[in-house]
Image (spheres, rainbow, N blue to C red):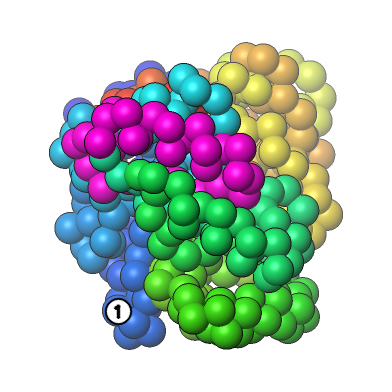
Amino acid sequence: MLVSELETPAVVVDLDVMERNLSRMTEYCRRQGIALRPHTKSHKIPDLARRQIESGAIGITVAKIGEAEVMLDSGITDILIAYPLVGRGKATRVAELAERADITVSLDSLEAARTISEQVTARNVKVGILAELDVGFGRCGVANEKELLMLAEQISVLPGLEFRGLMFFPGQFVVGPTERSALLGDVNDLLGRTQEAFERAGWPLATVSGGSTPTAYDAHKFLGVNEVRPGMYIFNDRNMAGIGVAGVEDCALSVIVTVVSNSVAGRVIVDGGSKTFSSDRYLAGDRCGFGLVKEDPDAELETLSEEHGHLNIRDSMHRYRIGERLSVIPNHVCSTVNMHDEIYGVRGERVETVWSVAGRGKVR
């Protein structure tokens, strides 16, 4: 099948670009002596997770138990669930996973740890634990090294749990290079104090797991980090290009859409709206639009209705035709992929493979 024969909207991945992204990240981590544990929330496709492992990753990261179940069913057995799991039902499912795989869970509360401990002990299995440290993003994680050490000590006495170290998510680094550099000092101060506190307690941290694609190639600059969890690097997106983490040429994924209306002056409608594209805002430049039109950067995907993408073409010299096909790089690749049942791997004009997004909708 040819790309031109795909019904639109269609999510396509340029395999040559994707493979280059995989190789680049693997080589960086190898050169720096850092373990690569990619976050599969960006693609939710077991075949791509296996390709990441084949290219050098030690295992994978997921956000939800449902994603872990999908990946484990495909044969992947080293999984970090980077999310605080709360409730007996989720703890029971984690214990069931631990009967078949090496499972690690990140958390930031004794309550979550106790519930998991009860369930894994009932099944005579073990689960690894990473305690999450808040390094300034203000989402999850304990506030400082004293609280982290206290939590680790409490975890260490709970049956069925193995404290393996700490993780953090520098979500505030989704900014340009200068701003990222300025943020690094405060994070390293906290990481340094934390590692010193654990060493004084006679408890060196085996794993210091950092993360995110925006910081992936700066992982060696974060004090003590020996594992990274980037997700979007496999595809990249408009936001990653906008903040200088990747170039447009490194964006492997795009959405092919068709022009369905040009009747309104200065505007074109395409057949992909909010049920096709991520509604996440653009984080760089003028912060406008919901994607980059590769064939016409002067056009702006200005607004999204459910099934309609509204292109503002007032600054464009391009003459749009009904039936014309366009390729749009979305602002945020992860949430775009999660809205589609399948995506197409292409090489040139030929569709080489079709992937089912098996982890789509696995939010529990």
- Residue 9 seen from this side: no
Nearest the camera: 346 or 2? 346
Q: Quadrant of the N terminus?
A: top left
Q: Point out the stretch of residues depicted in magenta.
A: 96-124
User: The disc labelled 1 sits on which kind of residue?
Assistant: Arg
Number of numbered callouts drawn: 1
Nearest the camera: 295 or 276? 276
Horizontal side, residue 150 vs residue 325: left or right: right
Q: Quadrant of residue 141?
A: bottom right
| Residue drawn where x is 76% and y is 29% of the image | 303
| Residue drawn where x is 64% and y is 61% of the image | 150
The residue labelled by disc 1 is: 30
| Residue drawn where x is 57% and y is 69% of the image | 215
Pinpoint residue 106: horizontal percent, then vertical percent.
50, 49
Horizontal side, residue 278 vs residue 315: left or right: left
On whether residue 94 falls in the magenta region, the answer is: no
Vertical comparison of 167 with 257: above or below: below
Badge 1: few (under 14), some or many (20 or more) residues near its Cα, within 10 Å? some
| Residue drawn where x is 62% and y is 14% of the image | 307
- Residue 198 seen from this side: yes
Task: Please tell me whether mark 1 sits on a helix, a strand or a loop.
Answer: helix
Q: Quadrant of residue 110?
A: top right
Nearest the camera: 128 or 14? 128
Vertical comparison of 130 with 100: above or below: below
Pinpoint residue 132: horizontal percent, then vertical percent.
59, 56
On whether residue 115 falls in the magenta region, the answer is: yes
Pinpoint residue 188: horizontal percent, then vertical percent.
66, 81
